[in-house]
Amino acid sequence: MSYINSIGFYLPENKLTNEDINKSHPEWSAHKISQKTGIDVRYITDDEELSSDLAVKAANKLFENRNIDRNSIDYIILCTQSPDYLLPTTACILQDRLSLSENIGATDINLGCSGFIYGIGLAHGLIETKQVENVLFLTAETYSKFIHPDDKSNKTIFGDAAAATLISKECRSDINFKVGNFVYKTDGTGYDKLIMRNSGMRRENIEDQGLYMDGKEIFRFTSLKVPILIDECLEVNKMKKDDIDIYIFHQANRFMLQTIGKRAKIDQDKLFLDLSCGNTVSSTIPIAIKNAQEKGLLQKNGKILIAGFGVGLSMGATILTID
């Protein structure tokens, strides 16, 4: 058994508002952007500010606000697709920058919008097999650095952020989230629907255009496959839709989330939307959980179905029970 004990997050200081985007792209009014995405503002890193910097600030904020002993951490996982280097592993750098014990494991996972689910699953597995007791799971992304200045579509969606989540063997705080059973899905045939070409070892004879997203195909994938994922997640956890108090999905954009909710036949009042800082990739779910908690929407014994989906194409889901 494992528990999510605490969540903290950090947003960069710079803001990119719909009005700012409108100045660069007059054909897109601020109102149109808001109506289309549900996003009014994104937080953007400075040129020299990296994912590791965001992760350090999110982790330190978590340690200080929740009075967590750094020496209690015995594994660190970083989920990012914008690491400091191809090698070494950025999680190893974070071990030093966060002044954590040398007697810990440290690894990166390269996943995007489903990354929070996968990271929780890995931490859960480490704890269940008695390898560790306390995992610091960090999600940090700076997608804004990948976006071409003329790419008005992706510019309206993505923001930068980091979240820090403590997953432990035992309850350590006033509100804990017991981790349930997982469902994972992968469709690698769609790998090129959300991609950064020429960003790794494979070189392609095409002009670099930064982050590329086939919005129509991503929407088709999520709107058709996520409802199935939800049903299978409920099945492996021996629950029904009525048993779930709140659904917290990867916060892609408002239209996509509402479409998934309708196709999955979810009560719209139970579908939590939190687009206050844009699509922050692997950090959207922990940020949404934290904000839902601060709004008083998460009650003892309540059940949360969380699901991530996107780049890969990759999906995952599980159910959290509030303890």
Image: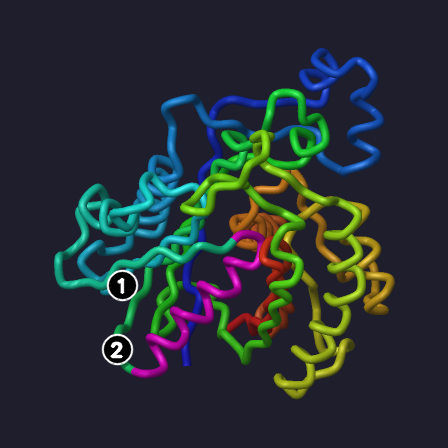
Mark 2 and mark 1 lie on one chain; the one further toward the N terminus is 1
- The type of colouring in the image is rainbow
Q: Which mark is residue 75?
A: 1
Which residue does the numbered mark 2 point to in the structure image? 131
Q: Is residue 22 left or right of residue 159?
A: right
Magenta span: chief secondary structure: helix
Quarter containing the N terminus: bottom left
Q: Residues within 10 Å of mark 2 (few under 14, many from 20)?
A: few
Q: Which residue is located at x 42 percent, y 53 percent?
A: 79
Residue under the image location 38 percent in, 71 percent down: 171
Q: Is residue 295 above or below residue 209?
A: below
Which element carries disc 1, helix, strand or loop? Answer: strand
**What residue lies at 68% left-to-right and 85% top-to-bottom?**
235
- Please provide the residue range marked out in magenta: 112-129
For this view, does 41 lie left or right of residue 120? right
| Mark sitting on residue 117 | none
The reply to whether the C-beta atoms of the residues labelled 2 and 1 are less than 8 Å apart is yes
